Amino acid sequence: MPASLQTLILLTLSNVFMTFAWYAHLKDMNNQPWIVAAFASWGIALFEYLLQVPGNRVGYTVMSLPQLKIMQEVIALYGVHSVCRALHEGGAEMGFPVGVTVSGGRGVLHVSRDAVRPGSSGIRRPVGESCLS
């Protein structure tokens, strides 16, 4: 399986746990003291990190740090959008911003890893050639 696909799968699963860790206590533990909710969220977040850390390590073999971060944010935004649509709370209004973000994320993720390394001057092109040519 390609490293980029492994990364996508691990980060998507990680995001599922992140969403539960951040928001499940609002509905399911509303009558519990906040400290109980915090410890429950930390327990769920452990599973998030057990997927997120390997996902980022695998992804870093083929992507740069900015590309990994953008991939994670696109996954998270898409996940929040899906939750909102499922709950019918503002999902339709988020369609355009989510689409723009996903489109921009796709563009950044298709840039060569070497082109965005620290100290790099950007995408390499022959001298005198514009980025629009």
Image (cartoon, helix red, strand yellow):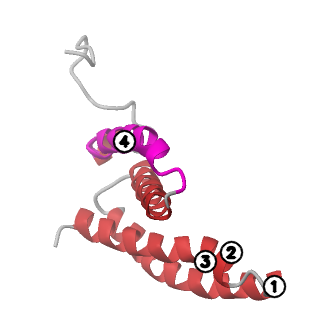
Which circle's residue, 4 or 2, is located before the other in the chain?
Answer: 2
- Quick one: which residue is furthest to the front in this view? 88
Magenta stretch contains residue 58 = no
Secondary structure, mark 3, is: helix
Query: Which contiguous range is marked in magenta?
Result: 89-112
Query: Residue 85: x percent and y percent?
Result: 44, 58
Quickly name the residue at label 1.
35
Secondary structure, mark 4, is: helix
Secondary structure, mark 1, is: helix
Q: CA distance from mark 2 to mark 1?
A: 13 Å
Query: Residue 32: x percent and y percent?
Result: 79, 87
Quickly name the residue at label 3.
24
Quickly name the residue at label 4.
99
Q: Amino acid at mark 1?
A: Ile
Q: Amino acid at mark 2?
A: Leu
**Residue density around tag 2, few if under 14, some if 14–19, many if 20 or more, within 10 Å:** some
Position of 17 relative to 115 (above/below): below
Position of 60 relative to 51 (above/below): above
The chief SS type of the magenta part is helix
Please tell me whether mark 1 or mark 3 is closer to you in this view: 3
Q: CA distance from mark 4 to mark 1?
A: 37 Å
Nearer to the camera, 87 or 81: 87
Quickly name the residue at label 2.
26
